[in-house]
Amino acid sequence: MPDTQINPTAAALLGLLHEGPMTGGQLMAAAERRLGPYWSMTRSQVYRELPVLADMGYVRLGKPGPRSSQPYAITAAGKRAFSRWLAEAPGRDALRNPVALRVAFGEQHAGGQLQSLYTEASEYHSEALAMAKEQAKEAKKNGDAYGSAALEFAVAYHKAALSWLKTAPAN
């Protein structure tokens, strides 16, 4: 972070703004569509980062639209900062799985609680896997090899989670 002074969320927003000017809501939709299967961003993160990026000169504000929506566009300085960020070492993954955390305390669960947890998690990962597969297929069909490759990470992640859930111990 010392080179660009931007965090991954800010960098993701700059990356998305390469597609053209967008409002905060449009950025959220684009992030969910393009990055959601493997990178989460909250609305509060987006709206917190945009003014910071503007203060840094990395984005500029456009003319307010309907309901005071404010479009943002990436500046030349923002493109340079994004390029520097891309060249930096990515750092370590931040693995935080709420199901695995609960499994770690499996002995304290009431009867049937773990099985319910596994069932819900399996349903989630099955749905997410199907969606990620479809998105990866669509990205590949549209000639987006890089987007497809990133989405294949999400496919592999959900497959791994489903495989682990099948072997996790129940009370």
Image (cartoon, rainbow, N blue to C red):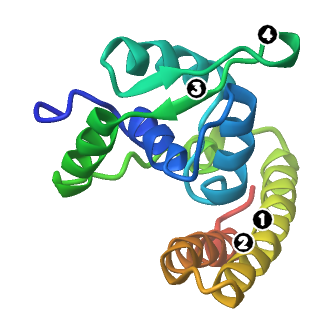
**Occupied quadrant, residue 108:** top right
Indicate whether 99 appears above or below 6: below
Q: Residues within 10 Å of mark 2 (few under 14, many from 20)?
A: many
Foreground tag (3 vs 4)? 4
Q: Residues within 10 Å of mark 3 (few under 14, many from 20)?
A: some
Residue at 63%, 68% (x, y): give it: 161
Q: On the image, numbered disc 2 is attached to which residue?
A: 132
Foreground tag (3 vs 1)? 3
| Mark 4: amino acid | Ser
Badge 2 marks a residue whose secondary structure is helix
What is the C-alpha distance between the residues marked 3 and 1? 23 Å
- Counting from the top left corner in percent of width and height, residue 150 is at 51, 71
| Mark 1: amino acid | Ala
What is the C-alpha distance between the residues marked 3 and 4? 16 Å
- Label at residue 78: none
**Occupied quadrant, residue 147:** bottom right
| Mark 3: amino acid | Val
Q: On the image, numbered disc 3 is attached to which residue?
A: 46
What is the C-alpha distance between the residues marked 2 and 3? 23 Å
> Do labels 1 and 2 touch, CB within 8 Å?
yes
Q: On the image, numbered disc 1 is attached to which residue?
A: 128
- Counting from the top left corner in percent of width and height, residue 99 is at 65, 48
What is the C-alpha distance between the residues marked 1 and 2? 6 Å
What is the C-alpha distance between the residues marked 1 and 4? 34 Å
